[in-house]
Amino acid sequence: MSPILIRALVIMFGLLIVASITIRVMSLCSPERDWTELRQRINTWWWIVIVFALAITTPRAISLTIFAIISFLALKEYLTLIPTRRTDHMPLLWAYIAIPIQYYWIGIEWYSMFLVFIPVYVFLFLPMRMVLIGNNKDFLHSASMLHWGVMTTVFAISHVAYLTVLPGKPETGPLLVIFLVVLTECNDIAQYLWGKSFGRIKVIPKVSPNKTLEGLVGGVMTTMFLAWLLGGVLTPLSGWESVLIGLLIGVTGFIGDVVMSAVKRDIGVKDSGKLLPGHGGILDRLDSLIYTAPLFFHVLYYLHY
């Protein structure tokens, strides 16, 4: 691992250590308050960061397997939320089979097949397989929901994995992944803090009542600043390119968050699952990344590859 990558990982684990110590001190100073949820959130972040570190530092086969497992868990969680027809068990199986195939294209660096496999071939194949079952009831509804799930949990997330195999120095890919994920998560946190502190004007109250214009603007500005700060260290982006990428991640991260909120409200659930204690489900943590990952990848690819 390069010195920059090592320092980045040390900083992430250092922040977790500080957070763990802080919550311990706070619980000792104010034992009357319930710190369970915050403690669960930090404990879960330990697991998230450990898995994330393994995904960007291990050999390619192991790294892509970890990303594929993340897509599998996300798709599985999504499919448990949506109503599916009993007759669709084979199309659902083929949706899962698409996961290792998609990550195989990444492993052999077949860029063109990586781009079209799910949007074209899986898109055409799954409805065909559903037609062969002979059940016309709710066909369009089932086919569209299944394909939307594969697009978000497999195709969109696989762009994070493809960053690790882009041409360049061995540390290029992992640093790009760190840049994307850190900015996406910091954008979520910054929008929450700005909104909590200064939020007055509701952006889309029917979908996400807690989202405010002040939180959105403050979060985007914070993300643009962090992108400018980190872009020259972690990426090949120039200063102005980093700022524009920060704007892109800030805005699209917000969109990804509210889109998944709309999905959950339509289904009638608050959280997508219970896989991550204190956070909800895996989709609750990946919602912003579903939008930021493919857009960041393709803008970066256009500018520098």
Image (tube, rainbow, N blue to C red):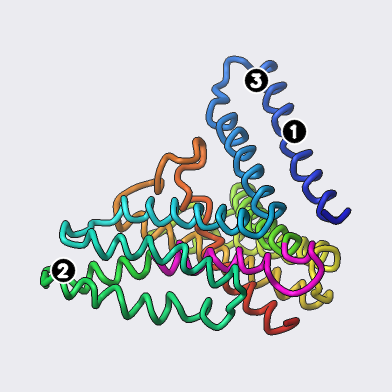
Q: Is residue 18 left or right of residue 200?
A: right
Q: In this view, does 56 lie to the left or right of 158?
A: right
Q: Of the numbered discs in the image, which one, if any, rests on residue 138?
A: 2
Cα separation between marks 1 and 2 = 50 Å
Give, as a three-letter code, the residue at label 2. Asp
Give, as a three-letter code, the residue at label 3. Ser
- Percent across and percent down for residue 208 are 44, 56
Q: Is residue 199 magenta?
A: no
Which quarter of the image is occupied by the C terminus?
bottom right
Residue drawn at x 78%, y 66% as measured from the top left: 172
Residue drawn at x 61%, y 64% as measured from the top left: 160
Q: Of the numbered discs in the image, which one, if any, rests on residue 17?
A: 1
Q: Does the magenta stretch include residue 154?
A: yes
Mark 1 / mark 3, whichever is N-terminal? 1
**Of residues 32 and 239, the one drawn nearer to the viewer in this rendering:** 239
- Percent across and percent down for residue 92 are 29, 61
Cα separation between marks 2 and 3 = 52 Å
Question: Which span of residues is magenta-colored?
Answer: 150-173
Which quarter of the image is occupied by the N terminus?
bottom right
Q: Mark 3 points at which residue?
A: 27
Residue drawn at x 22%, y 69% as measured from the top left: 141
